Amino acid sequence: MRYNALSILKQGLTGNKGWTPVWREPDPKPEYDIVIIGGGGHGLATAYYLSNKFGIRNIAVVEKGWIGSGNVGRNTTLIRSNYLLEGNQPFYELSMKLWEGLEQDFNYNAMVSQRGILNLYHSDSQRDAYARRGNAMHLTGSGGVLLDEAQIREKCPYLDYDNARFPIKGALWQPRGGSVRHDAVAWGFARGADMQGVDILQNCEATGFQIEDGTCKGVETSRGLIRAKKIAVCVAGSSGRVMSMAGMRLPIESHVLQAFVSEGLKPVLPGVITFGAGHFYVSQSDKGGLVFGGDIDGYNTYAQRGNLPVVEDVTEGGMALMPMIGRARLLRMWGGLMDMSMDGSPFIDRTHIDGLYFNGGWCYGGFKATPASGFCYAHLLANDAPHPVATKLRLDRFRRGAPIDEKGAGPQPNLH
Amino acid sequence: MIINHPLLGPRDAAEFVYLGDANLINRPEGLGDNAEDAMYDHVYLRDNPAGIHRELWYHEQGDRSWLVVTRNTLTHEVTSVELARDVARSMGRSR
Ligand SMILES: Cc1cc2nc3c(=O)[nH]c(=O)nc-3n(C[C@H](O)[C@H](O)[C@H](O)COP(=O)(O)OP(=O)(O)OC[C@H]3O[C@@H](n4cnc5c(N)ncnc54)[C@H](O)[C@@H]3O)c2cc1C
């Protein structure tokens, strides 16, 4: 069923009784061309682009819980393409372009809202770094504007400009940055893939791989063995756990990132604001809640919850940046699993096992990447060659001495 | 999380800095036959298990000792804490 104004009108007049489920709930078939493991944003986007743009439709997505139960439904929904390095920036710009046309493309309201992102700077050296980053953004046509203090005061009069330690001096502004309704992204991609015949298999956990003579021929699941020509792993925070079933060790550690949302308030934030002197970022949801977060907890974990020291650190950052946040009451907080890589950048690659492909290492920035990740992974699966903007996102890049380390922090996952 | 320091008793994990897998104390020989592979493995690849994990914590805001903490990554329960120095010595190293 296509969604449009006419169908809303028709349903409204007939008691809304004609809406059908958004995707089917099929039983697994014994064999597919491609099985995607992980029904998060990236897995569903991969299935969507494979079936809609690359003409491969005999696909299953196996998800151990329900789709959207992972990070795609837990993140703080920010999108931006303001990276610095060659291996990343063209990829994130492709993602931004796909976001811009996504709702028309998959006929679903994902509430893509480009209200802009302000990265604040507090010192001369930080200003220089942002000027450089802005120039890198212009190379990919991503747009970036360096604002001075007066220009920010106009947008956000309530920030603590004269803070004795971290006065606000200006910001790098990307007007195209913003936020997207996260679970609608999962549902929209799922619906678009399902309409092309992709089987979305929920409550179906991958428990092992069937590997014969160096070739992966199928995946064992809680709903039986499913054979496939290609198996595409796409499980974000569970990457280490799932790839260990194929005997692989990865340049990845799993960590937890926490997020927070306040009670609903009247519109106050123009877009996304990030603090440059501590790790704190904030936006306002369409319901009015202030959505904010900061650093990962910093230790290996698969528990989807964090600890109090980071809660304290994040809220201190909030108070230092915009003291008025202290008057808002916190509504909820939660955590999600991060597949933190050794350089803070992701992987979209084949493995040394034929037929087994890997997508992961998204750290805490993988939501904005969802459409491009799906598109590039679909390209790799369909053509057995990387998409031009993803040629550097390879698993062997550390062995070749070619990390993509935006922060220059070295192989220490909890510093990226 | 509370880390039961072998010398100082129970301490808040916020006093520590986390490094990662305890295997990082076994730095491979840099000039051996297989040095390149071994070093790549040591620096970049991780077991990253869901369950029991032995890991290095540094007591930066305390006595500056390195500890090997055994912790469950599914529950955050800490089951044992040793001085990294003792762990290295028990493996036959001088320090
Ligand atoms: C608190 C928080 C805030 C964040 N904020 C942002 C942000 O503002 N901007 C941004 O760009 N990114 C953000 N991120 C990061 C982003 O959410 C992730 O990088 C991204 O969602 C990961 O890709 P995914 O959607 O495919 O992951 P997921 O939704 O986690 O998908 C992986 C799926 O695999 C399934 N799975 C795991 N193991 C198995 C198995 N054995 N068999 C079958 N299925 C399995 C899981 O159940 C899960 O549904 C944030 C993350 C968190 C936790």
Image (cartoon, coloured by chain):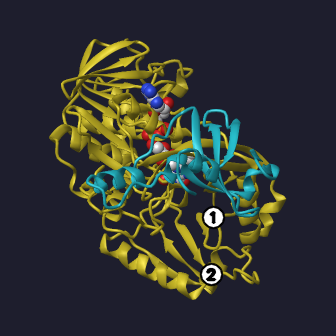
Q: Which amino acid does label 2 sit on?
A: His
Using a 10 Å C-alpha cutoff, classify the residue at mark 1 as few (fewer than 14 neighbours), some (14 to 19) or many (20 or more): some
Tell me the SS state at disc 2: loop
Q: Is residue A354 above or below residue A362?
A: above
Question: Residue A50's image quarter?
Answer: top left
Q: Give the residue number, with chain letter if any, for mark 1.
A: A279
Q: Pick out the residue farthest to the bottom.
A: A124
Q: Residue at x 29, y 23 (%)?
A: A197
Q: Which of marks 1 and 2 is nearer the N terminus?
A: 2
Colour given to chain A in the rendered image: yellow
Coordinates of residue A297 in the picture (x, y in percent): 64, 51
In the rendered structure, are the residues bearing label 1 and label 2 in contact, judged by CB atoms less than 8 Å apart?
Answer: no
Q: In this view, does A174 lie above or below A259?
A: below
Chain drawn in cyan: B
Residue A5 visible to an observer of this rendering: no
Q: Looking at the image, how many numbered discs can be counted on the residues?
A: 2
Q: Give the residue number, with chain letter if any, for mark 2.
A: A122
Coordinates of residue A104 in the picture (x, y in percent): 36, 45
Q: In this view, does A363 lie to the left or right of A387?
A: right
